[in-house]
Structures are given as structure tokens and as C-alpha cells.
Image (tube, helix red, strand yellow):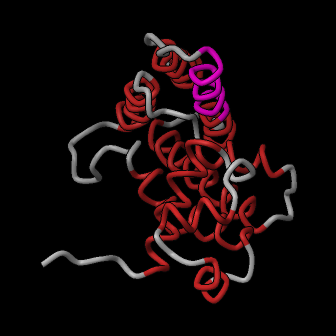
Amino acid sequence: MTSIAPPRERLLRAAADLFYAEGPAAVGVERLCQTAGVSKRSMYQLFATKDDVIAESLRTHGPAAVASYFPDPAADMPPRERILHVFARLEELAGTPAFHGCPFVNTAIELHDPGHPAAAVALHFKKLLEAYFQQHATTLGAPDPDFLAAQLTMLFDGSAVRAVMRAEPLHGLAVRAADALLDAAVG
């Protein structure tokens, strides 16, 4: 017997996939509902607006997107390697046809509205990445772990944008640049 996900889950999964691949503005409500196998009436019973769907799809699927870059918390890795793992994972993903950059940056840029509910969700997840870097930079003994975390986050975002804009893998650029930042900060 096949189990079919409830309409809300189908909408959020379809939204996450379509918005990541094409951007929220390019995907209309009709196409979203058709892809999810849900009527527009059902969607509007579940969500007041498409903006609410955008925000909730990020909120629901964001944790997995962020976690996919981090090593297993139980892995025996020193802090520097935990940081570099994020960039190695970015390099790995950026070399695939399914890579469309960072879903949080993409959404915030496309919306052009820091007050949009999805922009707030996107910022929350970018802050989680920066907090991850800050935690490990502190453990490394960086003199200014907040500044190093901000630099690493900018490098991550810029590397993702470069991979998308050039439609090519990063060829080690992100890992080498992160390693250079770490060398400059902590030796």
C-alpha cells in the first residue's frame, strides 16, 4: 500500500523544490498546486498567501538544507576540519547540475524585501551557518571569532553565487580560500 503525504506536506515539498530550482517569482500558484497535486482552494485553506507558502517551505525544509553541509556532530573532527568540511561539501554540491546556489540567499535576493516573511526565515538560516562558523572559530582560538565567522559566511555565499553564475564547479577555490582565511586568523 502506498502512502500519500497530506496536502500541506506535498505543497511545501513542491514549493521547496520549485522555488529552489526556478525562484519563487517564476512559479505561479497554479503550477505549484498542480505539481503538488493539491487544488488552489486547498492551498488557500492551508495558507493565506503564496508568500506564506514561500516562508513555510523555507522554514520546513531549511534545516535539512543547512545540515547537509555540516559533518556528523559525532564525527571525530577538529574545529578547523569541521569548518573546511562545509566548503568541501559546497564544492561537491556546486559541481552537480541540481545546484542552484543557496536557497536562502536566492530567496532573499529575489524578494527584494527584508520585511517579507520568507526573508526573515532566510536570514535565520544564514545566521545558523554563521553561528556554526563562530562556534568553531572560538574553539580554534581565533582572536575575533565573530569577524572570522562573518568572513567565512561571505565566502560561502560568494562561492555559491560564483558556481551558479559561471555554471561550473568551484575546482577547490572555496576550500582553499577558507583555508587561507583560517590561516590568516589563527595560523
Residue 6 falls in image quadrant? bottom left
The image quarter containing residue 142 is top right
109 horizontally vs 174: left or right = right
Q: Residue furthest bottom?
A: 45
Q: Position of residue 78 (x, y in %)?
A: 31, 36
- Is residue 40 rendered magenta in the image? no
Q: Nearer the viewer, residue 117 or 32?
A: 32
* Vertical side of 100 occupied by 176: above or below: above
Relative to 187, is 49 on the left or the right? right
Q: Which of these two is toward me, 26 or 135?
A: 26
Residue 122, image x and y in percent?
Answer: 66, 56
Q: List x then y, in percent, for residue 180.
A: 53, 15
How many numbered discs?
0
Relative to 177, is 45 above or below?
below
Above-or-below relation of 181 to 25: above
Question: Where does residue 29 sit, x and y in percent of width and height?
Answer: 67, 65
Q: Which of the two residues, 35 or 168, is positioned nearer the viewer here? A: 35
Q: Residue at x 56, y 21 (%)?
A: 163
- Compared with 49, 29 (above or below) is above
Q: Nearer the viewer, residue 136 or 85?
A: 85
Magenta span: predominant SS is helix
Q: Residue furthest left?
A: 1
Residue 163 on the magenta segment: yes
For the point 69% across and 53% down, the residue is 24
Question: Which stretch did the figure color magenta?
Answer: 154-166
